[in-house]
C-alpha cells in the first residue's frame, strides 16, 4: 500500500544542495488533487482513496463523470487515479476536500514515480533492442541494421513467441524507484525530485511512497 498524489512533469533543472552540491532534479507540479471517493473493506473489499487532478472542459466529460464531480462539489478533472491505503491513512481524507503535497510528502522522503515513457513510434531492432547489426564489409549490402534470421528448420517451422523484432517502441508504463524529494515548493504546488522521471514534458505522473522504504 502506497499513498500518493498526481502531478505533471514540467522538465529538468539543477539545484544546489548544501551537501551534495549541484545536482540534476526534475520539476513536478503535484496537486492540488480532489478526493472523489473513499473505498472501504465493507463496501468494496479493500481500502483505497480515489483522487482527481487537472482541469478539463465539461463538454469533453461524460455525463456519468460529471455527476461524480458534482457530488463532491468539484469541477471536471482530466486525470483520475486510485491509491491503495491503510485504514489509518484513509481516515485522514475527506471526500470533496483538496489534497496538497504537504499532506502526502515531506522533504528528503524516498518515493516511486510512475508515468508513460516517451513514444518513439515504429523502430528497428538496433534502436529498440540494442542489436549490434551486421558486419560492414564489402560483401554486405543494404543489410547493416537488419535483425538477421528469425526462422527455424522444418521443425518446428515457426517463429518463437516474444522474438525481438521491429515494432512499436515507447509509450509504456514505467516506474522509477527510490527517487528522493530534494525540495518542496508548497506555494507553487511543485516538488524537485532528484534524478530523471519517466515521461515527456507535461506528462501525467503518479508519485507514491516508496514500496521499499
Image: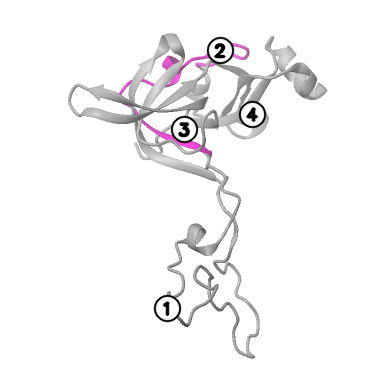
- For label 1, count other residues whose C-alpha is less than 10 Å away and answer few (under 14), some (14-19) or many (20+): few
Classify residue 89 as left or right of residue 63. left
Classify residue 179 as left or right of residue 205. left
Q: How many marks?
A: 4
- For label 3, count other residues whose C-alpha is less than 10 Å away and answer few (under 14), some (14-19) or many (20+): some
Which numbered tag is attached to residue 137?
Answer: 1
Q: Quadrant location of residue 190?
A: top left
| Residue at disc 3, secondary structure | loop
Q: CA distance from mark 4 to mark 3?
A: 20 Å
Foreground: 60 or 179?
A: 60
Image coordinates for residue 68, horizontal then vertical, percent:
73, 19
**Closer to the camera: disc 4 or disc 3?**
3
- For label 2, count other residues whose C-alpha is less than 10 Å away and answer few (under 14), some (14-19) or many (20+): some
Which numbered tag is attached to residue 2?
Answer: 3
**Closer to the camera: disc 1 or disc 3?**
1
Q: Which residue is mark 2?
A: 98
Dot 4 or dot 2, earlier in sequence:
4
Image coordinates for residue 201, horizontal then vertical, percent:
51, 31
Image coordinates for residue 134, horizontal then vertical, percent:
46, 74
**Closer to the camera: disc 4 or disc 2?**
2
Foreground: 197 or 166?
A: 166
Q: Which residues are magenta?
A: 92-115
Foreground: 160 or 112?
A: 160
Dot 1 or dot 3, earlier in sequence:
3
- Quadrant the C terminus occupies: top left
Answer above or below: position of 160 versus 36. Answer: below
Q: Which residue is mark 4?
A: 42
Amino acid at each position: 500500500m502506497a499513498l500518493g498524489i498526481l502531478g505533471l512533469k514540467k522538465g529538468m533543472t539543477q539545484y544546489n544542495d548544501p551537501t551534495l552540491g549541484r545536482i540534476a532534479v526534475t520539476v513536478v507540479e503535484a496537486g492540488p488533487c480532489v478526493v472523489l471517493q473513499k473505498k472501504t473493506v465493507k463496501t468494496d473489499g479493500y481500502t483505497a482513496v480515489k483522487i482527481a487532478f487537472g482541469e478539463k472542459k465539461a463538454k469533453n466529460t461524460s455525463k456519468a463523470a460529471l455527476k461524480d464531480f458534482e457530488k463532491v462539489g468539484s469541477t471536471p478533472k482530466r486525470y483520475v487515479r486510485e491509491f491503495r491505503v491503510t485504514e489509518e491513512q484513509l481516515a485522514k481524507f475527506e471526500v470533496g476536500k483538496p489534497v496538497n503535497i504537504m499532506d502526502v510528502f515531506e522533504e528528503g522522503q524516498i518515493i516511486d514515480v510512475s508515468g508513460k515513457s516517451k513514444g518513439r513510434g515504429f523502430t528497428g531492432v538496433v534502436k529498440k533492442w540494442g542489436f549490434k547489426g551486421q558486419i560492414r564489409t564489402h560483401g554486405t549490402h543494404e543489410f547493416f541494421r537488419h535483425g538477421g534470421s528469425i526462422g527455424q528448420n522444418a521443425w518446428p517451422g515457426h517463429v518463437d513467441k516474444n522474438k525481438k523484432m521491429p515494432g512499436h517502441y515507447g509509450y509504456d508504463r514505467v516506474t522509477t524507484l527510490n527517487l528522493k524529494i530534494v525540495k518542496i515548493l508548497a506555494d507553487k504546488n511543485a516538488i524537485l525530485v532528484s534524478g530523471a522521471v519517466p515521461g515527456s514534458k507535461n506528462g501525467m505522473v503518479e508519485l507514491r511512497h516508496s514500496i521499499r522504504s
